[in-house]
């Protein structure tokens, strides 16, 4: 059945699933942090809390936003033991009433990180957990917090970045073309210069031959002139 989502039908008809499908069509069906707020920067507070700052997530089409910050408590570790917890963004949908919710939670692990629930929200599954951070404890100390999400640029920034890459590419191509043109012209000029030099050399040889012939004729003329003078007694 066709559903006109962005149209007035005289009744409420646009659902979160409609908006989620639209978001997924634009951004993709994956899950990632978008370019708003502080993009979930974090800090460790008193070796007990992970403070996660503002940001936005598109998770399988659902847009989820954190305003301000949230402090997530990490359960104290055990002496001489490594533990890996996961801070996750959890999506749930009530099967009876269709009410949806999202919250950031800590999922406790062991020496290996815990297994998360992987649901397909777009297909209507009710539960999904998106990994945001891996928190490693060595004994009682939080030693490492690793972001597990990817970040995408806004469309405006993508446009600016792409335009910059295009401009750089074109500049490289133009420079390469100019270098090749200069190389070809230099090679051509060298060839012309070589031909001119060869022509000059040939002309010099011909002129030298002509001069030699002239000198021979002149010398012979002088000999005949002298002989003629002697004959006529002039």
Image: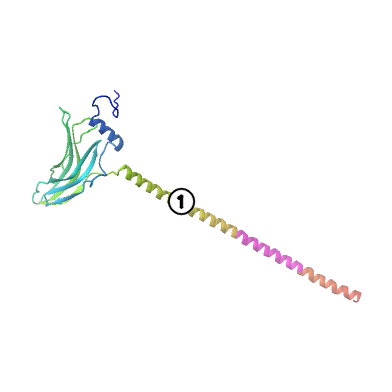
State which quadrant residue 19 falls in: top left
Residue placed most toward the observer, 231 or 182: 182
Give the side of residue 199 with respect to residue 11, left or right.
Answer: right
Residue 196 belongs to magenta span: yes
Identify the residue at the far right of this view: 232
**Location of mark 1 (residue):** 174
**Residue 155 spot, x, y in % from top left:** 32, 42
**Residue lying at the far top of the rendered structure:** 1
- Residue 157 rendering spot, x and y as whole percentages: 32, 45
Label 1 neighbour load within 10 Å: few <14, some 14-19, many 20+:
few
Quadrant assignment for the C terminus: bottom right
Q: How has the structure been colored for display?
A: rainbow
Q: What residue is drawn where x is 36% and y is 45%?
A: 162
Specify the quadrant of the image occupied by residue 232. Answer: bottom right
Residue drawn at x 12%, y 48% as measured from the top left = 49
x and y percentages locating residue 111 in the rendered image: 14, 46
Query: Image height check: is 204 above or below 229?
Result: above
Asked if the magenta segment contains residue 3, the reply would be no
Magenta segment's dominant SS is: helix
Seen at 67% across and 65% down, the residue is 204
Count of marks overlaid on the render: 1
Q: 133 or 216, which is in the foreground? A: 133
Question: Label 1's element?
Answer: helix
The quarter in which the N terminus is drawn is: top left
Percent from the top left, x then y, of residue 63?
A: 23, 37
Residue 199 in view = yes
Q: Is residue 234 left or right of residue 80?
A: right
Front residue of 129/96: it is: 96
Write down the region rendered in magenta: 194-214
On screen, 124 above or below 103?
A: above
């Amino acid at each position: 059945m066709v559903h006109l989502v962005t149209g007035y039908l005289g009744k409420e008809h646009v659902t979160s699933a409609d908006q989620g499908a639209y978001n997924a069509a634009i951004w993709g069906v994956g899950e990632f942090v978008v370019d708003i707020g502080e993009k979930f920067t974090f800090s460790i507070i008193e070796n007990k809390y992970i403070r996660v700052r503002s940001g936005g997530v598109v998770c399988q089409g659902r847009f989820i936003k954190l305003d301000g910050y949230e402090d997530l408590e990490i359960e104290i570790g055990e002496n001489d033991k490594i533990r890996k917890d996961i801070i996750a963004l959890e999506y749930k949908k009530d099967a009876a009433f269709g009410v949806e919710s999202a919250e950031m939670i800590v999922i406790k692990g062991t020496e290996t990180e815990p297994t998360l629930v992987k649901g397909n929200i777009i297909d209507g599954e009710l539960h999904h957990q998106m990994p945001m951070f891996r928190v490693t404890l060595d004994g009682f100390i939080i030693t490492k917090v690793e972001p597990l999400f990817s970040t995408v640029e806004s469309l405006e920034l993508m446009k600016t970045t792409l335009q910059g890459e295009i401009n750089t590419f074109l500049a490289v191509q133009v420079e390469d073309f100019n270098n090749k043109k200069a190389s070809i012209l230099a090679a051509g000029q060298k060839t012309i210069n070589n031909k001119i030099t060869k022509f000059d050399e040939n002309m010099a040889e011909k002129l030298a031959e002509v001069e030699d012939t002239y000198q021979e004729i002149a010398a012979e003329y002088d000999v005949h002139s002298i002989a003629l003078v002697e004959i006529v007694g002039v």
